[in-house]
Image (cartoon, grey):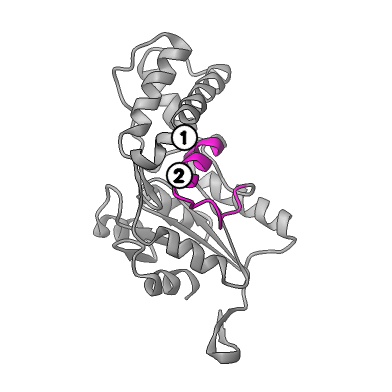
Amino acid sequence: MLNSGPGNLEVVTTKRLVLWDIDHTLVDFTGLGSAWYAAALAATTGTELVSYPDFGGRTERAISTDLLTAHGIEPTEELLQALWLALIAESERAVERLPASGRALPGAAEALAAFAGQDGVVQSLVTGNLPEISRHKLAAFGLDEHLDLEIGGYGTLSAHRPDLVPHAVAQAAAKHGTEFGAVVVIGDTPNDVEAALDHGAVSVAVATGHYAPEELRAAGAHTVLPDLADIDAVRAAVLG
């Protein structure tokens, strides 16, 4: 809910939790994940990567499980953990090169900064990425500054993306000592939309990934934006 405060500034009267996806929502590192997986699979199992899993809107646990299974390897928890450590090592080696390996998407920095200055709004993540890789990808463009990365939902938690939302909400409520009257999930895939709708959250979808606006609308997104460049439109979708 928005009221008009002193000087006609908007004031949020409902505590609002905004949960961002990363890849193709805030940043674009197309091709980087495939290269890291090839190196991590070889380092962990000695196996050459010959089959790529579906990455779009899926969690690291789901992707890694499919990857190992497709190469005839049993996806034990021990092996998943080893594969993730190898992926983190790849990202750490690439940290200095990351700004040249991708880009921040239009409006990403401005949107994060706008909500950071909004009373009653807490921003975090619901992402398929590992926590460490999330930080690296965002920090490459200074996008980590306005996000509380301690309370997000990350791809290690579950192969089922909707499970990440209630985890992030519970962590945020515990840390901030408050219930959030509104939860908004922002992403670029039907899986992001499903994750929001499964838990009664508002779904804001951006068509900056591999899905057309009509596909995101068909998935049930409450608002579909071409990108984050129109800050007024983003604010209306999130705070409306």
Displayed quadrant of residue 14: bottom right
Closer to the chain start, of discs 1 and 2, is: 1
- Asked if residue 26 lies left or right of residue 156, the reply is left
* Residue numbers of the magenta segment: 127-149
User: Disc number at residue 95?
Assistant: 1
* Residue 191: image location, x then y, percent: 40, 47
Residue 97: in magenta span: no
The residue where tag 2 is placed is 140
**Residue lying furthest front in this view?**
96
Residue at screen point 25% across, 59% down: 214
Instruction: Sort mark 1 into few (<14), some (14-19) or many (20+) by Cα contacts within 10 Å.
Output: some
Does residue 202 show up?
no
Q: Nearer the viewer, residue 214 or 48?
A: 48
* Residue 59: image location, x then y, percent: 46, 37
Residue at screen point 48% across, 56% down: 196
Residue type at mark 2 is: Ala
